Image (cartoon, rainbow, N blue to C red):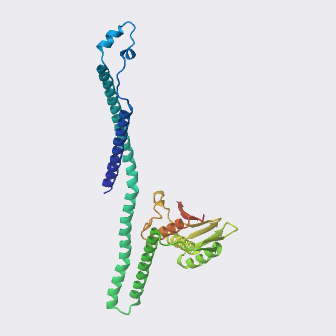
């Protein structure tokens, strides 16, 4: 499909180039023909300056008609040379345009191909993620038919319904953000110091290790979209609790927030994929792989910069609040 698209781009470009060259060449030929004066009879004494010749004899032998033939022949020869030159230039231009178009068409098609592949992967992953909770719900419903009083089956159903519902809401949010139909939350005065401490308390029961917070700025109050910031912060802390081993470090600098965990190293080639939808460095961990994609989309929507660094025993996510 993409090869056909590339070939179509080349064919259309070459056709347009050929048409332009034909029009331009024809215009030059017509202009050259109309601007050149018609041959007129001239006295032979003007055309030939031969001191040793008898001018009267030459005038008798060379008629006006012969002069016209001579000038017309010279004119045709000039037109032929011009035509050959135009054809040569046209062929060279066609070759150059073909090479450039072939190279650029590969560049043009590459993002479309990449987007198409991501879309296919997105649909496959979304189907898989939704299939899992639905299968669990179905299995527990069958078990409930046998043992209607077992609370475990009911709890499992509720858990998976919550999981499926969150997945659908995340997908809906990403779809709306892609379509530009969801606006960022209104800006308000936000005390990051207080908010971070509050979020840490909420996540402490979920993480068996230690969560620390360090403020390296005297001013922690900013005018920001609070709801967007809370969602990004929750996603980063939640991600850290899933992949961290014993500690999570949150640091607040001047308009910069970082969340670091001591989990496994993210390989360099995977750092570029870390914010892709459904991408997970460890498939055994709980989650759908949409959290970081939403965090990146929210950051871009608010002109923040979000990045990831990883090294020996650490993975750090940095949000620069520009």
State the image coordinates of residue 240 (x, y, percent, origin top left).
53, 70
- Relative to 208, is 281 on the left or the right? left
**Along the viewing direction, whichever of 246 and 174 lies nearer the viewer:** 174
- Relative to 145, is 202 on the left or the right? right
Q: Quadrant of the C terminus?
A: bottom right
Q: Which residue sits at x=33%, y=32%?
A: 84
State the image coordinates of residue 212 (x, y, percent, origin top left).
61, 71
Q: Which residue sits at x=34%, y=22%?
A: 41
**Along the viewing direction, whichever of 104 and 69 lies nearer the viewer:** 69
Residue 237, quarter of picture: bottom right
Q: Quadrant of the N terminus?
A: bottom left
The answer to whether residue 95 shows anywhere in this view is: no
The answer to whether residue 40 shows anywhere in this view is: yes
Q: Residue furthest bottom?
A: 149
Residue 165, quarter of picture: bottom left
Whether 123 is drawn above or below 164: the answer is above
State the image coordinates of residue 121 (x, y, percent, origin top left).
37, 65
**Along the viewing direction, whichever of 293 and 189 lies nearer the viewer:** 189
State the image coordinates of residue 249 (x, y, percent, origin top left).
59, 68
């Amino acid at each position: 499909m993409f090869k056909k698209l590339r070939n179509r781009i080349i064919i259309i470009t070459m056709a347009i180039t050929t048409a332009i060259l034909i029009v331009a060449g024809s215009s030059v030929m017509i202009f050259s023909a109309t601007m050149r004066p018609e041959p007129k009879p001239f006295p032979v004494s003007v055309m030939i300056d031969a001191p040793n010749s008898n001018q009267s004899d030459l005038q008798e032998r060379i008629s006006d008609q012969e002069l016209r033939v001579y000038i017309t022949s010279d004119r045709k020869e000039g037109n032929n040379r011009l035509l050959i030159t135009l054809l040569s230039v046209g062929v060279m231009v066609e070759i150059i345009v073909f090479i450039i178009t072939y190279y650029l068409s590969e560049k043009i098609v590459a993002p479309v191909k990449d987007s198409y592949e991501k879309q296919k992967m997105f649909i496959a992953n979304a189907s898989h993620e939704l299939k899992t909770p639905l299968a669990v719900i179905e299995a527990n419903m069958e078990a409930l038919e046998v043992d209607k009083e077992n609370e475990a089956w009911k709890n499992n159903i509720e858990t998976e319904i919550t999981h499926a519902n969150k997945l659908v809401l995340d997908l809906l949010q990403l779809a709306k953000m892609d379509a530009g139909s969801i606006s960022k939350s209104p800006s308000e005065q936000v005390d990051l110091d207080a908010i971070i401490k509050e979020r840490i308390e909420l996540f402490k029961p979920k993480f068996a290790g230690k969560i620390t917070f360090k403020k390296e700025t005297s001013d922690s109050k900013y005018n920001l979209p609070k709801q967007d910031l809370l969602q990004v912060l929750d996603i980063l802390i939640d991600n850290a609790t899933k992949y961290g081993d014993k500690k999570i470090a949150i640091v607040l600098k001047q308009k910069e927030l970082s969340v670091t965990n001591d989990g496994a190293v993210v390989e360099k080639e995977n750092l570029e994929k870390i914010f892709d939808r459904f991408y997970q460095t460890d498939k055994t961990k709980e989650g759908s792989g949409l959290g970081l994609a939403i965090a990146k989309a929210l950051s871009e929507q608010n002109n923040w910069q979000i990045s990831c660094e990883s090294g020996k025993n650490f993975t750090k996510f940095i949000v620069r609040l520009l």
